[in-house]
């Protein structure tokens, strides 16, 4: 596994050298766009409509549009100068309880392994975080952007999860019901029973991307020249009474449970 970033976790006057590794892999199936007539991959070129000509990478600059049609140029050197002081440091600001952070804030995860030096400091930080049950809220600069992050303890190593800043989270207030919906006590009881009957320990391996598997299978069949049979689209079910739907769901769960129950000799 190749490290993406080398630096140090900084808290107080303590620096803990670390190496950062990607914790996730993008497995999206990606397509190329071809010319329908000859099946040649399409090229996307940069074109200036004012000068009426194609431009190269050396002719491009970054700019911020502060009014419609009005821009201020920002150089790469200026961007680098703003970030240079923090590009090699994960600066811990606070230690908090993980339960206090809504999962909506997290969006990308990395592993943090010990650096080439400072192994004792790494393990000291890890043991102290385990003992207190705390996670660290920190700042890190990646690709010229300052990110909020959470550092926590995994069984194998430390991890870092990038987080949205509070002003990047949209308010859900406009989606709140305008008036309270009356729900019968029996409906609540039956819905609770359904939730309890479907409750189980979380086992990540049981959740798979069925769409990607079917897509790859279809692609392999087309490469092999086999006929491809497309699945029929499911028709939306008719709307039925809520209580009847809950009863049917509970019955379905019970039947599934009986089917999986081991039979005696």
Image (spheres, rainbow, N blue to C red):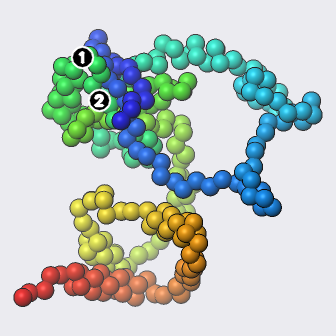
Q: At which x and y percent is residue 104?
A: 44, 47
Q: At which x and y percent is residue 188?
A: 34, 75
Q: Nearer the viewer, residue 158 or 163?
A: 158
**Quarter-of-image position of residue 73:** top right
Image quadrant for the C terminus?
bottom left
In this rendering, the answer to whether 8 lies above or below 2 is above
Report the residue at 18% width, 81% height from top.
Answer: 261
Q: At which x and y percent is residue 124?
A: 18, 23
Q: At which x and y percent is residue 107?
A: 45, 43
In this rendering, the answer to whether 112 lies above or below 196 is above
Report the residue at 22% width, 80% height from top.
Answer: 260
Q: Seen in the image, is 246 located left or right of residue 212?
A: left
Q: Are marks 1 and 2 in contact (CB under 8 Å)?
A: no
Q: Nearer the viewer, residue 63 or 173?
A: 63
The residue sitting at the front extreme is 224
The residue sitting at the left extreme is 265
Q: Could you tell me which secondary element the residue under label 2 belongs to? A: strand
Q: Could you tell me which secondary element the residue under label 1 belongs to? A: loop
**Quarter-of-image position of residue 148:** top left
In this rendering, the answer to whether 230 lies above or below 90 is below
Find disc 1 in the rendering and name its residue: 118
In this rendering, the answer to whether 26 lies above or below 78 is below
Q: How many marks?
A: 2
Find disc 2 in the rendering and name its residue: 113
Report the residue at 26% width, 71% height from top.
Answer: 196
Inspect this view and state whether residue 210 appears.
yes
Earlier in the chain: of badge 1 and badge 2, it is 2
Q: Seen in the image, is 57 located left or right of residue 171?
A: right
Report the residue at 27% width, 86% height from top.
Answer: 255
């Amino acid at each position: 596994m190749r490290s993406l970033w080398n630096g140090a976790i900084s808290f107080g006057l303590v620096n803990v050298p670390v190496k950062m590794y990607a914790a996730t892999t993008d497995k999206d199936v990606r397509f190329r766009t071809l010319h329908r007539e000859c099946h040649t991959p399409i090229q996307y070129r940069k074109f200036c409509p004012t000068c009426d000509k194609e431009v190269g990478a050396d002719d491009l600059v970054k700019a911020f549009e502060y009014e419609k049609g009005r821009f201020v140029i920002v150089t790469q050197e200026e961007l680098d100068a703003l970030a240079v002081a923090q590009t090699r440091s994960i600066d811990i600001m606070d230690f908090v309880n993980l339960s206090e952070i809504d999962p909506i804030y997290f969006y990308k995860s990395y592993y943090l392994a010990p650096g080439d030096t400072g192994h004792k400091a790494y393990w000291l930080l890890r043991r102290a975080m385990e003992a207190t049950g705390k996670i660290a809220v920190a700042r890190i600069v990646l690709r010229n952007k300052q990110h909020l992050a959470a550092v926590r303890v995994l069984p194998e190593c430390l991890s870092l999860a990038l987080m949205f800043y509070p002003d990047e989270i949209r308010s859900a207030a406009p989606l709140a019901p305008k008036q309270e919906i009356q729900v019968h006590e029996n409906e609540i009881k039956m819905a609770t029973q359904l939730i309890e009957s479907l409750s189980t320990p979380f086992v990540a391996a049981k959740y798979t991307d069925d769409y990607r598997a079917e897509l790859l299978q279809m692609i392999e069949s087309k490469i092999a020249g086999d006929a491809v049979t497309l699945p029929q689209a499911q028709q939306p079910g008719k709307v039925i009474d809520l209580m009847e739907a809950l009863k049917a769901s509970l019955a379905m769960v019970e039947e599934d449970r009986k089917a999986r129950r081991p039979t005696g000799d």
